[in-house]
């Protein structure tokens, strides 16, 4: 039976279509547990007909028994398996939950199989994989629970089903061959303590189950300390000296590192004339290579993402070293083909070609849009100096930047007839509240503050702090404020007090639980520093967050971890850190912390454009993406991260959605890896449990090119969401001009509106346009 059968009764002319009406009470949150399997306990395993291969029983978390899956004797990408039978409900939506120990450090992948078919997708699917570890303890000395849905088409009419857990090595999501993508499993998996089948959206373990204790007042780190600045300077200067020793011409990454180092006083490059000579030679050689291969503009293999950066690193160096390079412009150089050409003309050609490529290859994912547009701007800024007549008007390239940071509608790449407008005339890269839209909330890829700081600086007068475009600065601070809600208190990998990024509910985040230690900027990123937004703006709130990081003794630890990374982009990012640190040390102490910090008041942050909510309620934090990885169609799925002092829950669940139908549907294919595009289907012989499921597609705005199967920002976005999860009821209206009625479930009569603190007295409430209501049971 098809969950979307009733959708076929909806017509394209209907004003509104309710999704998923087939099963009554499908999302009722408080239905009970159907079955519990206690791993490592012989009686329970026997009762569930457990059969395992390459596994063993251990006693670990709080002296509780568990079962781990082992690598093969000769390691391959596959590890051990556990098969068993569990009870399910024959009518309602069933969920499967596993209890894990939060102190395990694991890098395995675990997939659930139901009746021999794979549940969920291995990489960034809307129905998530069960587990992919990143080697860090997720929830020290306490248990966490991971929940995913079992396909209704598999459980309908059954009271029991065959389930299996299969282990694999971890993956590298950017790999395009199997050898790149899938790693062997070489170490045992994390421990499986219990498994549950249930029809509630949130698992509520029996009260007599063993749980860890809340960790109050975690200790502060003792080190590292300021000695890391000496280590940093030594690394930078060593790599600069290595570049000075090169006999070949510099590539663009080396040019982009050397040029700003010329103005950093503590480096060996400071006002060193050899810097200018080497950079000029590197630019000349790049031109010669371009003559041999014009595609070099976007295929430069010596830099990362050459089609995004084009010749922007050279352009930026020209602007940064303009007083030193200007006397050289009319000198000539051999072009490698026996002709003489001036530096001015050769470099101008490189800039002009970079601009043309970037303008005609703009991308709509926000981080990519920002990077491409910023380096386009750098090329044009250099061309304005080299050959003003050929440069685009400043307002044109600044306009691209404004599009990429959400100050103007994003109109897409340039075509012979004007902007492509592939997402229409009114698509904005940022939400009104300052989050990126890729397509919904993203964790790591949404951490674009480093690019905006870079953009802000590059629009200013070189060497003059605070002279960048003021509108970009305003957006930078809006974004920084919005991102601040997505850091929660936790322990770092060594058990010390920290704040971590929320990435569980991120669209483009894979093995990011727990998230990195982050306060303001994502300092561990290649091009970022931990203090860059605070130092660039000196905004009191950003300074306060930076001071919180320093007070928690996490600044130098982040710096230490960053220096474990290799690569010239990482080394380049270290250039500004000593001066940023000294600047922040001089600032007045701000009485500001990240919103989720223990000493901060309760709040509800919602972003209706991204379909995301962040809640602080006493000592509980709840993050939910109600619009969850719905790339192709309405899927009615949500992702929830619910943090309490003693239990952490990660849940992939079905919720209630209402939307305007297009009349089109999307049918899930037999894909097991990338469920949204069918790419890299390396796992032959494995069938998807979701094949054939039919999903309705929401109305697509006029003028937007679309066909079923396309990824589209409109295809899967609902107009209204409501979600019951434990004691929480959340209702979100994503439209700007329509109200929706919320029928209060029986279990939430007399619940409290978390914002107004008023008790629900009516059986139905109105959810106003572009608003979110949160209720909590007393």
Image (tube, rainbow, N blue to C red):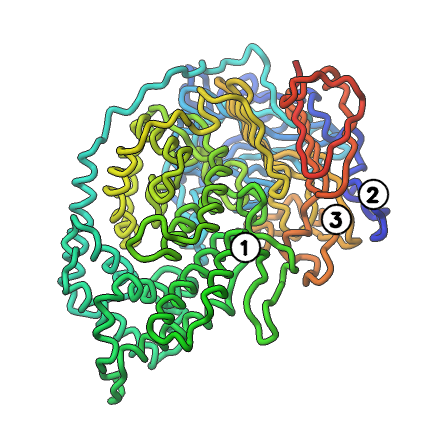
Query: Does 170 sit left or right of 741 as displayed?
Result: left
Nearer to us of marks 3 and 1 is: 3
Look at the numbered discs 2 and 1 and tell me whether their residues touch, using CB distance below 8 Å: no
Look at the numbered discs 3 and 1 and tell me whether their residues touch, using CB distance below 8 Å: no
Mark 3 or 1 closer to N-term?
1
Q: Which mark is residue 696?
A: 3
Is residue 64 shown to the viewer in this render? yes
Where, quadrant-wise, is the N terminus in this rendering?
Answer: top right
Where, quadrant-wise, is the C terminus in this rendering?
Answer: top right
Give the residue number, with chain letter if any, for mark 2.
6
Q: In this view, does 386 lie above or below 88?
A: below
Is residue 98 shown to the viewer in this render? no
Determine the secondary structure under disc 2.
helix
Across and down, in percent, residue 102 comes to: 43, 25
Query: Does 44 sit left or right of 634 as displayed?
Result: left
Q: Identify which residue is drawn at 29% across, 79% down.
A: 288
Across and down, in percent, residue 714 comes to: 67, 51
Disc 1 packing (10 Å; few <14; some 14–19; many ≥20) = some
């Amino acid at each position: 039976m098809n969950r979307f059968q009733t959708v076929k009764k909806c017509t394209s002319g209907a004003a509104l279509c309710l999704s998923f009406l087939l099963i009554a009470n499908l999302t009722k949150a408080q239905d009970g547990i159907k079955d519990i399997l206690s791993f490592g306990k012989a009686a329970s395993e026997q009762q569930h007909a457990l059969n395992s291969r390459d596994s063993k029983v251990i006693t670990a978390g709080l002296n509780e028994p568990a079962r781990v899956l082992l690598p093969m004797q000769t390691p391959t990408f596959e590890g051990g398996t556990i098969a068993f039978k569990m009870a399910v409900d024959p009518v309602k939506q069933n969920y499967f939950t596993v209890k894990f120990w939060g102190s395990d450090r694991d890098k395995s992948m675990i997939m659930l199989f139901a009746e021999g078919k794979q549940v969920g997708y291995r990489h960034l699917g809307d129905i998530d994989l069960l587990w992919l570890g990143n080697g860090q303890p997720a929830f020290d000395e306490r248990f966490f629970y991971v929940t995913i849905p079992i396909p209704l088409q598999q459980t309908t009419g059954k009271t029991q089903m065959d389930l299996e857990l299969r282990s694999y090595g971890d993956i590298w999501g950017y790999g395009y061959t199997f050898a790149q993508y899938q790693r062997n499993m070489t170490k045992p998996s994390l421990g499986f303590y219990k498994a549950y089948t249930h029809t509630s959206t949130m698992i509520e373990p029996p009260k007599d189950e063993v749980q860890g204790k809340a960790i109050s007042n975690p200790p502060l780190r003792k080190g590292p300390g300021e000695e890391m600045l000496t280590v940093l300077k030594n690394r930078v200067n060593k790599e600069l000296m290595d570049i000075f020793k090169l006999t070949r011409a510099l590539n663009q990454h080396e040019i982009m590192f050397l040029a700003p180092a010329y103005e950093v006083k503590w480096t060996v490059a400071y006002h060193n004339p050899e810097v200018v000579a080497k950079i000029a030679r590197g630019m000349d050689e790049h031109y010669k290579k371009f003559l041999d291969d014009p595609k070099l503009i976007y295929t430069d293999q010596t830099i990362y993402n050459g089609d995004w950066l084009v010749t922007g690193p050279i352009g930026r160096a020209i602007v940064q070293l303009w007083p030193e390079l200007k006397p050289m412009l009319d000198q000539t150089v051999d072009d490698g083909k026996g002709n003489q050409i001036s530096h001015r003309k050769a470099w101008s050609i490189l800039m002009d070609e970079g601009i043309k490529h970037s303008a005609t290859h703009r991308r709509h994912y926000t981080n990519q849009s920002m990077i491409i547009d910023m380096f386009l701007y750098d090329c044009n800024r250099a061309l304005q100096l080299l050959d003003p007549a050929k440069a685009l008007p400043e307002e044109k390239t600044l306009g691209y930047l404004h599009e990429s940071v959400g100050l103007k509608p994003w109109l897409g790449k340039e075509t012979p007839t004007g902007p492509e407008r592939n997402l229409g005339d009114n698509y904005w890269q940022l939400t009104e509240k300052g989050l990126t839209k890729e397509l919904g909330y993203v964790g790591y890829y949404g951490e674009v503050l480093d690019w905006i700081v870079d953009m802000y600086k590059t629009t200013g007068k070189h060497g003059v702090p605070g002279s960048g475009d003021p509108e970009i600065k305003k957006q930078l601070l809006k974004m920084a404020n919005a991102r601040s809600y997505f850091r929660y208190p936790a322990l770092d990998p060594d058990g010390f007090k920290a704040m971590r990024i929320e990435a569980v509910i991120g669209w483009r985040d894979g093995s990011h639980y727990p998230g990195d230690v982050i306060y303001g900027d994502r300092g561990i990123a290649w091009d970022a520093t931990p203090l860059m937004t605070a130092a660039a703006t000196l905004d009191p709130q950003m300074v306060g967050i930076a001071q919180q990081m320093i007070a928690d003794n996490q600044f130098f630890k982040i710096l230490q971890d960053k220096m474990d990374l290799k690569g010239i982009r990482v080394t380049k990012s270290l250039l500004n850190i000593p001066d940023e640190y000294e600047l922040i040390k001089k600032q007045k102490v701000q009485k500001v912390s990240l919103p989720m910090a223990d000493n901060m008041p309760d709040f509800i942050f919602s972003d209706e454009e991204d379909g995301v909510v962040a809640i602080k309620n006493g000592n509980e934090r709840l993050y939910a993406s109600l619009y969850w990885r719905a790339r192709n169609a309405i899927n009615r799925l949500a992702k929830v991260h619910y943090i309490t002092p003693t239990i952490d829950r990660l849940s992939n669940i079905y919720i209630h959605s209402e939307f305007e139908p297009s009349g089109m549907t999307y049918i899930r294919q037999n894909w097991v890896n990338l469920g949204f595009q069918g790419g890299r289907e390396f796992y032959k012989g494995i069938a998807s449990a979701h094949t054939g499921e039919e999903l309705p597609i929401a109305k697509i705005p006029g003028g937007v090119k679309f066909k079923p199967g396309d990824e589209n920002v409109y295809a899967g976005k609902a107009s209204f969401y409501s979600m019951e999860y434990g004691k929480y009821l959340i209702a979100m209206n994503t439209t700007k001009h329509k109200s929706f009625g919320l029928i209060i479930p029986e279990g939430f009569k007399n619940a409290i509106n978390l914002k107004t603190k008023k008790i629900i007295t009516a059986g139905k409430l109105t959810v106003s346009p572009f608003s979110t209501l949160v209720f909590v049971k007393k």
